[in-house]
């Protein structure tokens, strides 16, 4: 008997059939991957299983009995838990209060907080139950979601991109936990764009393309290339090799120290780094170790940096506004797509106006036609799957919105581009496209600073690599000399102290 069986699941939205007659079977204790490009229908299918979306046609059987799951609460009562890629947390509540909302109210808040501490320690997913969610980074919020799901002791656990916040060592620890859950009979539906993870963890894989099932394989018998080919229907784009040598220093950060802005923030201590023309410098680290604070200081969102601590082309910009920095050639892609990178309810055309001023007249009037033309150019040039310039940002899949936001900043012709999590939750094809664009910028002489929790991405892109841990920045290491084991150790703050001052 199957734990879960889907028969002919179909879901139609205006202009797109997200799921088209999908059949899926998950056995007890099976770790079952669902693989597909952004927009392939994975998230819609998971929401149908979890009761957040109702299908237009098809049946669902749970432990051999047909069910119609009408809500997430009903799904949790059956034994189904889900960790969303885009989180379902209330910003003004604490981590413990958010977790409590999804649990049996027979437990007190204090008991939930204690269980949260115990489970997060057991699985190596640090969560402070008292932290308000609005003070958490994207990665820390994902940990709250994972712990909340594990506390329900589910029979089926749906995980959407669960490892983007973890060090390589912590990924291995999580895999041990998931295998233990599997051995105890818990079924796992695992969505990831990290093909090596799917091959290492999962014993079955269903591949979706265009809302349909196009293949079922044993991922342990496949290669990254064969899985990628199944997923996108072609070989993944090949990145162009690096060209040229780094030139003059564009960004210089020296002795940057900033106290935390709120009780749950991270204090930055003596940060030093340099980025040159024609160079990509990476910053690795587990989410919540000062990335947000450093990015805010570099982008101009936090204007408290000491005078002279941040220089662009040797000009002091430590107290300059984001607008002044953009005018000087610094462009920025934040890690949060919806809410900071784009306004969810506004059209793509109007979202271009967040950082681009071409469609604004000197007297402040908006030239809507020019904004629409710019959005149309970005949609075509960066192969964004969207109905057109008037589509609201929230209607795009995560990967397509990311391509639009990254494209908006690349198209501006930056002299320095700072990017946070460039391909978080993005499929193989879109990730290769974004990375290819970043390498093209580098080869054209742009300086790039890339913050990412994807070590594979940093090793693929960067010339040099720093690690941030507890508000401190490691010395840089040339990518040719770095190893994943070394970077994993440094992510715990363990690097040679005698090298701690970067010589820019």
Image: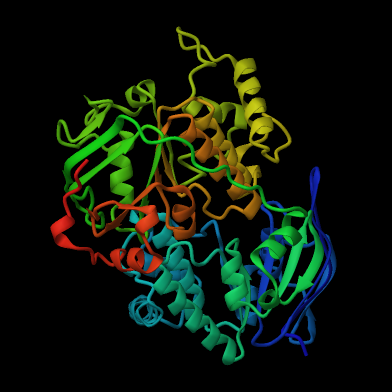
Residue 503 at x, y percent in the picture: 19, 44
Say left or right for 308 vs 329.
left
What's the coloring here? rainbow
User: Which residue lies at the image location 59% right of the left edge and 41% below the top edge?
Assistant: 403
Q: Quadrant of the N terminus?
A: bottom right
User: Which residue lies at the image location 48% right of the left edge and 34% below the top edge?
Assistant: 443
Q: Residue furthest front?
A: 244
Looking at the picture, tell me which residue is in the foreground, 106 or 178. 178
Q: Is residue 25 above or below residue 303?
A: below
Quadrant of residue 198 within the rendered picture: bottom right
Quadrant of residue 100 within the rendered picture: bottom left
User: Which residue lies at the image location 49% right of the left edge and 66% below the top edge?
Assistant: 163
Q: Is residue 429 above or below residue 185?
A: above
Looking at the picture, tell me which residue is in the foreground, 111 or 416. 416
Say left or right for 44 vs 23.
left
Q: In this view, does 52 lie above or below 450?
A: below
Residue 36 at x, y percent in the picture: 70, 59
Q: Which residue lies furthest to the top in this view?
A: 363
Whether residue 453 is visible to the viewer of this picture, yes or no, is: yes
Q: In which quarter of the image is the C terminus?
A: top left
Looking at the picture, tell me which residue is in the foreground, 85 or 365. 85
What is the tally of numbered marks visible in this picture? 0
Residue 433 at x, y percent in the picture: 61, 44
């Amino acid at each position: 008997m199957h734990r879960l069986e889907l028969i002919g699941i179909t879901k139609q939205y205006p202009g797109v059939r997200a799921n088209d007659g999908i059949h899926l079977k998950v056995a007890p204790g099976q770790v079952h991957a669902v693989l597909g490009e952004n927009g392939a229908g994975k998230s819609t299918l998971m929401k149908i299983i979890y009761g957040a979306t109702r299908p237009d046609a098809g049946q669902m059987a749970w432990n051999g009995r047909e069910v119609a799951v009408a809500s997430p609460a009903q799904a949790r009562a059956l034994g189904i838990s889900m960790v969303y890629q885009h989180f379902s947390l209330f910003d003004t509540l604490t981590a413990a209060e958010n977790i409590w909302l999804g649990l049996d109210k027979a437990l007190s808040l204090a008991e939930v907080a204690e269980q949260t501490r115990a489970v997060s320690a057991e699985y190596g997913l640090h969560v402070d139950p008292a932290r308000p969610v609005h003070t958490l980074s994207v990665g820390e919020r994902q940990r709250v979601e994972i712990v909340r799901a594990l506390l329900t002791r589910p029979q089926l656990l749906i995980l959407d991109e669960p490892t983007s916040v973890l060090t390589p060592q912590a990924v291995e620890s999580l895999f041990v936990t998931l295998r233990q859950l599997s051995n105890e009979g818990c079924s796992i539906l695992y969505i990831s764009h990290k093909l090596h993870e799917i091959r290492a963890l999962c014993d079955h894989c269903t591949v979706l393309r265009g809302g349909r099932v196009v293949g079922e394989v044993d991922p342990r018998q496949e290669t990254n290339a064969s899985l990628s080919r199944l997923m996108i229907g072609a070989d993944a784009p090949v990145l162009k090799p690096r060209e040229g040598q780094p030139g003059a220093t564009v960004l210089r950060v020296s002795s940057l120290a900033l106290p935390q802005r709120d009780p749950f923030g991270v204090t930055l201590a003596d940060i030093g780094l340099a980025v040159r023309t024609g160079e990509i410098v990476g910053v690795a680290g587990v989410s919540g170790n000062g990335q947000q604070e450093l990015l805010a200081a570099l982008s101009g969102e936090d204007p408290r940096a000491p005078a002279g601590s941040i220089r662009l082309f040797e000009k002091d910009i430590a107290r300059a506004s984001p607008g002044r920095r953009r005018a000087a050639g610094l462009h920025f892609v934040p890690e949060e797509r919806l809410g900071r990178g784009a306004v969810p309810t506004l059209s793509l055309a109007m979202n271009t106006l967040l950082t681009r001023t071409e469609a604004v007249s000197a007297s402040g009037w908006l030239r809507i036609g020019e904004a629409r033309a710019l959005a149309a150019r970005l949609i075509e040039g960066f192969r964004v799957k969207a109905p057109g310039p008037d589509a609201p940002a929230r209607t795009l899949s995560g990967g397509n919105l990311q391509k639009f936001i990254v494209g908006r900043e690349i198209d501006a012709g930056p002299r320095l581009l700072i990017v946070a999590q460039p391909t978080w939750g993005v499929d193989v094809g879109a990730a290769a496209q974004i990375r290819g664009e970043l390498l093209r910028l580098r080869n054209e002489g742009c300086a790039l600073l890339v913050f990412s929790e994807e070590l594979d991405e940093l090793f693929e892109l960067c010339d040099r690599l720093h690690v941030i841990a507890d508000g401190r920045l490691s010395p840089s290491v040339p990518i040719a000399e770095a190893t994943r084991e070394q970077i994993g150790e440094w992510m715990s703050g363990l690097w040679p102290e005698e090298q701690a001052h970067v010589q820019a």
